[in-house]
């Protein structure tokens, strides 16, 4: 009788366990966490890309992989990192974090590019959205308070009508070319190695204006040394709610939101891509991640792989005629 009681209890336990197992996909139960994940970032420690990589990576440890490390493969405007992921095994152990412009603008400005946007990497999820802003410094009179005021000032002062951006060939560079075209004004572009370097020269009175990620201007606007005149999104920036967009001020063709995204090597199995995307969706909703991004003027945002693929293709097609019209190439 005692033996029967033990077997009966065991049978009930097994039945209960079987019912619980039925609530989960067998594929999920079969998946063990990989030991290590490398997040490869194309820029130096301390910057925007590095912050996204590290804050998100902290939340992926134990959720997607047992251990997560960030590798900063800085250089060549982010291209080195893309090449590193392109060459990595397609097993989900390497994850690229990159601004979108390396994939949707670089193909239009480099005659010889070492990677193909659509065949060498696979979209996993967006990471964050940013908008860009045009700001002016002490070289521009205090009376200049709008983008139209600045355009008028540039037309009246053609020799001083310069603007800086984080780099030649960057999204802010081409936003400047769009301003020129839409407003019928000529401005001279000056590329820097980062937005902050451009802002320093602007605050020093060496250039009148800078176009760059609006979050980069936050501490300087608060001191009153910099005035933000317009932001590039379809709606006002949450970080500058009192500043009208370009579109609100009559430049309706300028509605630009740039994104950072996560990618894996081509031929990575769909099952791995989807698992990584699901883990990123949870990580990017975490309050600590959201708050840390906001400090740098970024809005955390995840997506499905298909959504990111569609967004990438749309941006690739959008920028092609704009870049070609300028005649700019990175090889010149």
Image: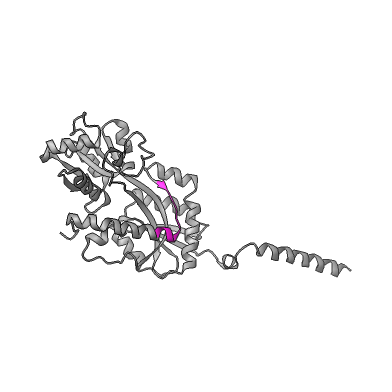
Q: Position of residue 68 (x, y in %)?
A: 45, 58
* Quadrant showing the N terminus: bottom right
From this view, report whether residue 112 is shown above or below residue 248. Answer: below
The answer to whether residue 247 is above or below residue 111 is above
Against 114, residue 145 (above or below) is above
Q: Residue at x 34, y 58 (%)?
A: 314
- Left-right relation of 191 to 96: left
- Looking at the picture, tell me which residue is in the foreground, 271 or 149: 149
Viewer-closest of 64 and 67:
64
Residue 298 sits inside the magenta stretch:
no
271 on left or right of 191: right
Q: What colour scheme governs how the chains and residues are painted in the rendered image of this protein? A: one colour
Give the residue drawn at x 49%, y 44%: 287
| Residue 230 coordinates in the image, percent (x, y) | 28, 39
Q: Which residues are magenta?
A: 299-308
User: Can residue 96 be seen?
Assistant: no
Residue 23 can be seen, yes or no: yes
Looking at the image, is 274 positioned above or below residue 322? Answer: below
Residue furthest to the right: 1
Quadrant of the image containing the C terminus: bottom left
Identify the residue at horizontal 24%, vertical 37% (top origin): 147
Residue 86, how many percent across, how many down?
35, 67
**Quarter location, residue 244:** top left
């Amino acid at each position: 009788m005692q033996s029967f009681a033990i077997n009966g209890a065991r049978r009930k336990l097994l039945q209960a366990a079987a019912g619980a197992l039925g609530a989960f996909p067998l594929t999920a139960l079969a998946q063990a966490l990989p030991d290590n994940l490398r997040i490869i970032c194309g820029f130096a420690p301390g910057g925007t890309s590095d912050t996204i990589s590290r804050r998100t990576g902290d939340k992926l440890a134990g959720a997607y992989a047992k251990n997560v490390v960030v590798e900063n493969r800085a250089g060549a405007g982010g291209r080195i990192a893309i090449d590193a992921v392109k060459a990595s095994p397609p097993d989900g152990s390497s994850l690229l974090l990159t601004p979108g412009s390396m994939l949707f603008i670089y193909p239009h400005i480099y005659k010889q590019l070492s990677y193909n946007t659509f065949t060498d990497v696979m979209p996993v999820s967006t990471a964050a959205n940013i908008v860009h802003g045009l700001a002016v410094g002490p070289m521009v009179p205090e009376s200049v308070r709008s983008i139209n005021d600045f355009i008028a000032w540039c037309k009246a002062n053609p020799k001083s009508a310069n603007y800086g951006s984080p780099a030649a060939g960057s999204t802010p560079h081409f936003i400047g070319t769009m301003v020129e075209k839409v407003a019928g004004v000529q401005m001279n572009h000056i590329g820097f190695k980062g937005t902050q370097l451009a802002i320093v020269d602007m605050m020093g009175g060496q250039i009148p204006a800078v176009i760059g990620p609006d979050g980069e201007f936050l501490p300087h606007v608060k001191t009153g040394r910099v005035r933000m005149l317009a932001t590039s999104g379809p709606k006002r920036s949450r970080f500058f709610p009192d500043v009208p967009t370009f579109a609100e001020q009559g430049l309706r063709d300028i509605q630009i939101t740039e994104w950072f995204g996560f990618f894996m090597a081509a031929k990575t199995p769909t099952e791995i891509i989807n698992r990584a995307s699901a883990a990123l969706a949870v990580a990017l909703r975490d309050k600590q991640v959201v708050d840390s991004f906001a400090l740098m003027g970024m809005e955390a945002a995840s997506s499905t792989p298909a959504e990111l693929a569609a967004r990438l293709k749309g941006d690739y097609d959008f920028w092609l005629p704009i870049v070609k019209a300028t005649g700019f190439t990175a090889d010149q």
